[in-house]
């Protein structure tokens, strides 16, 4: 089992990571699941008495205040006091929302993240961002707060759909491109099905952890994590508005191709990135830039009327705050 020390908590990685669950110091313990993690993941947790299972419906459409009310009600009705623990067993939706509910219940109780999707393992469970969607706006309400620990067992990925696995992998590719040339070389020289998840997850978490530790509230360095996401979010919103939503990672893969084009790197590197992504992942059609403009113009990061991109200086290195006027795209 490996330990990565983050800001005030540890990320444990490996088959034995679940043995780090320590309930004894808590008056009550609840586990938050959705129907998929209840069926596929809950049985892997150590058994203990007197634990409340709180089950919610899966999906981003349930990451909202109504579901939070239900979670707070369950905690209240079961007499959870301030010395209680909430364990979030699931993907990024469960982690973001469960962490938010725990951080606000009675002004904050402890929570532990047990991510069960690749995206949640390498991205959502690291960095302390918690929250829910509100009035159609993603992650509109939330806060920064860290869990007691993050426990990662890559065996949970065995039941995850191939699409969700590949979608989460977009964030691994992003981490390699912005910060780790060695990880990139490993990724492009290994067939997707032969990747050793535990190794990939550990390296990927170390990259995100280092970046967020240096800039916890996204003032500078942390913006590197936006590479691929400016176009990516616009593409995701475009398909959502069309009524044919695509997975986040699929949009980010297309976003990374478009933002690689804008990056001041060699033609060879651009081709290497584009060829790798296009030959390994099935992607939606890239919308015309004119169709993306309304979404780009509403991007939270915009400054001086320009679109703000994080771009590659070379493979494994990234710069932030590259401003482009609409007619320069
Ligand atoms: N906090 C952050 O820094 C951060 C970063 C990135 C993304 N996010 C958030 O993460 C969310 C997306 O997370 P996600 O991609 O994990 O989606 P998700 O939580 O919706 O999970 C995807 C699907 O997989 C199912 N599932 C989860 N684990 C499973 C398993 N082991 N086996 C079978 N099915 C399983 C879920 O029930 C769900 O249907 C978004 O809300 C996004 O805003 C947060």
Image (cartoon, helix red, strand yellow):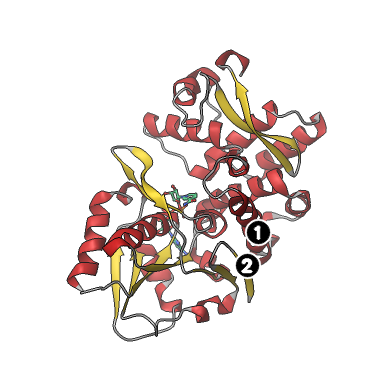
User: Would residue 88 be visible to someone looking at this image?
Assistant: yes
Q: Tell me the element at label 2.
A: strand
Q: Where is 214 relative to 114, above or below?
A: above
> What is the crowding at mark 2: few (fewer than 14 residues within 10 Å), some, or many (at least 20)?
some
Q: Where is 119 relative to 313, above or below?
A: below
Q: CA distance from mark 2 to mark 1?
A: 7 Å
Label 2 belongs to which residue?
Answer: 4
Q: Quadrant of the N terminus?
A: bottom right
Residue at horizontal 70 percent and vertical 49 percent from the top = 176
Residue at horizontal 66 percent and vertical 54 percent from the top = 207
Q: Tell me the element at label 1.
A: helix
Label 1 belongs to which residue?
Answer: 206
Residue at horizontal 31 percent and vertical 81 percent from the top = 27
Q: Give the quarter of the image for residue 294.
A: top left
Q: Give the quarter of the image for residue 111.
A: bottom left
User: Would residue 56 be visible to someone looking at this image?
Assistant: no
Please report contact status of discs 2 and 1: CB closer than 8 Å, yes or no: yes
Q: Is residue 74 left or right of residue 280?
A: left
Q: Nearer the viewer, residue 119 or 128?
A: 128
- Ligand 1 shows up in which quadrant of the image? bottom left
Residue 318 on image: x %, y %? 70, 39
Residue 269 on image: x %, y %? 79, 36
């Amino acid at each position: 089992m490996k330990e990565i020390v983050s800001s005030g908590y540890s990320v444990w990685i490996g088959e034995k990571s679940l043995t780090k669950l320590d309930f004894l110091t808590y008056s009550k313990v609840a586990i938050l699941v959705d129907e998929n993690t209840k069926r596929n993941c809950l049985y892997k947790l150590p058994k203990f008495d007197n634990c409340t299972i709180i089950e919610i419906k899966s999906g981003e459409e349930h990451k909202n205040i109504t579901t939070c009310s239900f979670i707070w009600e369950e905690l209240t009705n079961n007499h959870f006091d301030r010395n209680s623990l909430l364990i979030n067993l699931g993907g990024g939706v469960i982690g973001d929302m469960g962490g938010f509910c725990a951080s606000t219940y009675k002004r904050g109780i402890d929570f532990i993240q047990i991510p069960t999707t690749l995206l949640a393992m390498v991205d959502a469970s690291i960095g302390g961002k918690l929250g829910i969607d509100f009035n159609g706006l993603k992650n509109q309400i939330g806060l920064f707060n860290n869990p007691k620990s993050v426990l990662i067992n890559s065996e949970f990925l065995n039941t995850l759909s191939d699409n969700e696995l590949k979608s989460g992998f977009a964030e691994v590719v992003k981490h390699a491109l912005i910060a780790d040339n060695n990880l990139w070389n490993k990724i492009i020289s290994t067939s997707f099905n032969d990747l050793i998840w535990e190794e990939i997850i550990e390296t990927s978490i170390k990259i995100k952890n280092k970046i967020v530790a240096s800039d916890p509230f996204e003032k500078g360095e942390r913006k590197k994590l936006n590479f691929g996401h400016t176009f990516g979010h616009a593409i995701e919103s475009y398909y959502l508005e069309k009524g044919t939503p695509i997975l986040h990672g699929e949009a980010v893969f297309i976003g990374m191709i478009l933002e690689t084009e804008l990056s001041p790197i060699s033609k060879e590197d651009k081709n290497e990135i584009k060829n790798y992504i296009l030959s390994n992942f099935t992607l939606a059609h890239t919308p015309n830039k004119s169709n993306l403009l309304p979404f780009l113009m509403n991007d939270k990061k915009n400054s001086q009327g320009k679109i703000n991109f994080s771009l590659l200086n070379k493979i494994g290195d990234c710069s932030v705050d590259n401003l482009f006027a609409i007619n320069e795209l």
